[in-house]
Image (cartoon, grey):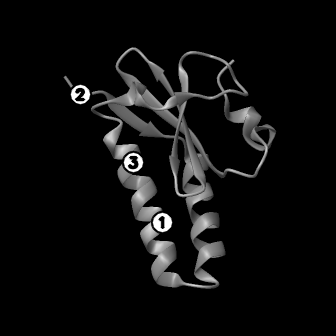
Amino acid sequence: MDFVVSWSPQVREDLHEIAAFIAKDSPRYASAVVEKILAAGRSLQILPNRGRVVPEVGHENCHELFIYEYRLIYFVEGRDVRIVAVIHGRRLLSAVASRMPK
């Protein structure tokens, strides 16, 4: 049975910002990066626990996948996977701390 993947509204903004930043140099590469991030998120329907536990959070349900230099951060609860952020690996997680479930 597949897991149900949902994307928080803020992730859409994250992806737009990432695409806009990369597109300054290469619109084609921007599109490819965003598509790879989206594909990684969709792939969580099958194996959501394959990502490592986010060290800064330390909660066993909070995982991340790396896509190029970006971190796709998500929570697994039962059969639900909620993607809460996509941030550059050099950014501090505190920039998106408000998105983390309590």
In which quadrant of the rendered image does the C terminus lie?
top right
Disc 1 marks which residue?
A: 33
Label 1 sits on a secondary structure element that is helix
Callout 3: helix, strand or loop?
A: helix
- Name the kind of residue labelled 1 in the image: Val
Sequence-wise, the earlier of marks 1 and 2 is 2
Amino acid type, callout 2: Asp
Asked where in the image residue 6 lies, by quadrant, the reply is top left
* Position in image of residue 89 (x %, y %): 68, 50
**Residue 90 drawn at (x, y percent):** 74, 52
Residue 63 spot, x, y in % from top left: 54, 29
Task: Examine the rendered structure and indicate whether residue 49 appears above or below residue 64.
Answer: above
> How many discs appear?
3
Q: In this rendering, would 50 be left or right of 94?
A: left
Q: Nearer the viewer, mark 1 or mark 2?
A: 1
Residue 2 badge: 2
Q: Quadrant of residue 95?
A: top right
Sequence-first tag of 2 and 3 = 2
- For numbered disc 2, what is the local secondary structure? loop
Residue 2: name its quadrant. Answer: top left
Residue at screen point 73% across, 41% down: 96
Find out whether the residues at labels 2 and 3 contact each other: C-beta distance under 8 Å: no
Give the mark nearer the N terminus: 3 vs 1. 1
Residue tagged by mark 3? 40
Q: Residue at x 34, y 19 (%)?
A: 79
Find the distance from the CA under tag 3 to the CA under tag 1: 11 Å
Classify residue 34 as left or right of residue 62: left
